[in-house]
Amino acid sequence: MSTWSNKIIDDALSLPSDERVFLVEKLLMSLNLPVQADIEQCWAEEAERRLSQLAQGEAELIPGNEVFMKIRQKYAK
């Protein structure tokens, strides 16, 4: 890491916690990652899709203990 980057990090760490939170939020927003509302919308759509599949008989439920048993068997060492 460059001296410049280290200086920025040192300066950021010296900020009060509320200003560090603000800085983190701004940096994350600059990455153009999906925002929480977008993520929640995608999960809601996925849940609706899965419910529809169940209602139409296109999918079946598998008990959780069966799923975890298969995972343990698959990854047992």
Image: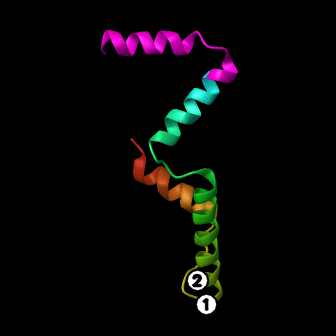
Q: Which residue is mark 2?
A: 53
47, 5: nearer the viewer = 5
Residue 8 screen position, x and y as percent = 44, 15
Q: Residues within 10 Å of mark 2 (few under 14, many from 20)?
A: few
Give the prevailing secondary structure in the magenta stretch.
Answer: helix
Residue 11 screen position, x and y as percent = 51, 11
1, 65: nearer the viewer = 1
The residues colored magenta run 1-19
Q: Residue at x 55, y 13 (%)?
A: 13
Q: CA distance from mark 2 to mark 1?
A: 5 Å
Figure check: 2 above or below 38? above
Quick one: which residue is furthest to the left in this view? 2
Figure check: 46 above or below 77? below
Quick one: which residue is furthest to the bottom in this view? 56
What colour scheme governs how the chains and residues are painted in the rendered image of this protein?
rainbow
Q: Residue at x 65, y 22 (%)?
A: 19
Q: Residue at x 63, y 27 (%)?
A: 21
Q: Are marks 2 and 1 in contact (CB under 8 Å)?
A: yes
Residue flagged by tag 2: what amino acid is it? Gln
Disc assigned to residue 56: 1
